Amino acid sequence: MTLLVEKGSDQTSTEMKGQAGVIPGSPAPTAQGADSDPLRLTLAESLRAPKMVQRTPVQSDSSSVQPKGPSVQPEGPSVQPEGPSVQPEGPSVQTEATPPPPEKPPVHGPLLYEEPLPGTGKTAPGGPRAIPSSGKKAKKAETLHTLALIIDDLGYEWPIAKAIIDLPADITLAILPKLPYSREIAKWGKTTGRELLLHQPMEPHRYPHISPGPGAMLAWMDREGLQAVLRSNLDQLPEVVGINNHMGSRLTENGQAMDAVMAVLAEKQLFFIDSRTSEGSVGAQRAAVGHVPTAVRDVFIDNKPNEEAILRQLAQLERLAHSHGEVIGIGHPYRATLAALQRWLPTLPQKGIILTRVSRFIRPVAARAHYPDHHPVVDRDGHRDGHAVAASPPNSTPGN
C-alpha cells in the first residue's frame, strides 16, 4: 500500500474509484477531497480493496449459496425452458396432443356414442320438443299410443348391430359413415326391411377434444365443403331414406350450415331427424324452411347405459306415447340397451303400444306417404312370414 502511495496516489485513486464505483453504497470521492488529502484518500481507497477481494468470495459464496440461488435460478431458466416448452406444447395441442382426428376414430375400447354436455358427462336431455307446424295435424287415431325408436351409432361393431337388427320390431337404424361395418350393416338392414338413416357426424361444441368421427361436417367448412362431405357419406350408404345428426351441438345451431344440409336433402328427397344434442338447435326449423320433412327426438333412452335405467326411460317413452301420440326415442348399441329391449319389446302389445319406423312421424304429414311403410320383420332364423330369405347375413368379419 505504501508503494502505491509513493508511486502516485492520483492514478491509484482513479483505478480504485472505478472499482469502488461498482460497489453498492461506496460514495465516490469528490475532486475536492482528492486534492485536500490524497494520502487519506489513498488509504481509504486501499481499505476498500480488501472489501473488493472479500466481495468476490461473497459472490462465490452466493454461488455457493446458489443452490438456493440456483434453486431460484433453475426456476428462472426453468421458466425459460418452459417458455420454449410451452411453444412446442402449443402446436402439439393442435396436432399430436389432441384427440384422434375425424379420419382416424378409435375403434377399440370405450366408444363415445353421444356428445356429453359440458362438465356433466351426460347427453342432451329429453323433454317437450318443438316441431315446426305443417298446418295440418295427423289424425289422433292414426298415431295414438305409437312410438319410434332409432338406434344410433351403428358401424363400429358387427355382432351387436346384427343382434339389434334381428330384434322382432320395426326399429330404425342410424348408421355412421366410413366405419368398418357401415356397409355390411346397411346391406343386412335393407335385406331385413329396416328403415335406414345416415347418422351424419357434425361438429360438437367441445371439438376437437370430442371428435365426431370420420365423415364429419365441421363449422369451418364453407357451404360447398359441407355439402361435399354429406354427398360423399350418402353415396356410401345409398339405402338410407333420411339422416339424423351425430353430436353436432355446434353445427346444428348454425343456420347457414343447416341450410346447406337441407339443400342436399331436398334434392335427394330425404328427411331430417333432429337428434337435438343442443337446446339451441335450428335443424328442424331450417328443414321446414327448406321444404325437408322433419321430426325431433324426444328421449335418449340410455344416457345411463344400465339395463334398469334404460327400462325406466322406455317407460317414459310409453307415457309420452299415451299422452302425445307421436314419440321418438334414440338409443345406442350398448349391450345393456340390447338386453333392455329384449325384455321390453314383448310387453308392448299388452300395453296397446305400437312401435314403428320414424318416417311415420315426420312433418308435413303428407310427406309420410313418400317413404316405404312397415315391412314384415325377418325373424332370428332368417324367415319373413314363414319363408326363408334369399340373402344371408354377412359373416362375423365382413369387409368394407
Image (cartoon, helix red, strand yellow):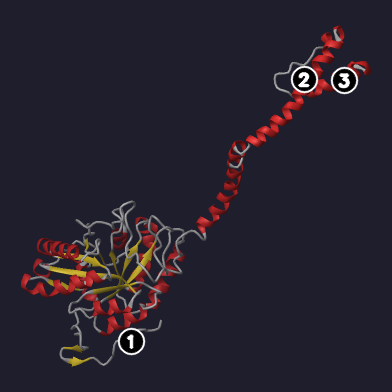
Q: Three-letter amino acid code at disc 1? A: Asn
Q: Nearer the viewer, mark 2 or mark 1?
A: 2
Place residue 124 in its image quadrant: bottom left
* Left-right relation of 54 to 334: right
Labelled disc at residue 12: 3
Q: Earlier in the sequence, mark 3 or mark 2?
A: 3
Give SS at disc 2: helix
Q: Residue at x 15, y 88 (%)?
A: 385
What residue is disc 1 on? 395
Task: Indicate the amino acid at tag 3.
Answer: Thr
What secondary structure is found at the residue carrying circle 3? helix
Circles 3 and 2: CB atoms closer than 8 Å: no
Quadrant containing the C terminus in the rendered view:
bottom left
Q: Residues within 10 Å of mark 3 (few under 14, many from 20)?
A: some
Residue sitting nearer the eye, 95 or 307: 307
User: Vertical placement of 120 versus 375: above or below?
Assistant: above
Q: Is residue 33 left or right of residue 58?
A: right
Query: Residue 112's quadrant in the figure?
Result: bottom left
Alpha carbons under labels 2 and 1: distance apart: 95 Å
Out of 343 and 24, give the one closest to the viewer.
Answer: 24
Q: Name the residue at 8% across, 74% down.
A: 349
Q: Position of residue 263 (x, y in %)?
A: 37, 66
Camera sees residue 385? yes
Identify the mark at residue 48; answer none if there is no mark: 2
Q: Residue at x 80, y 12 (%)?
A: 30
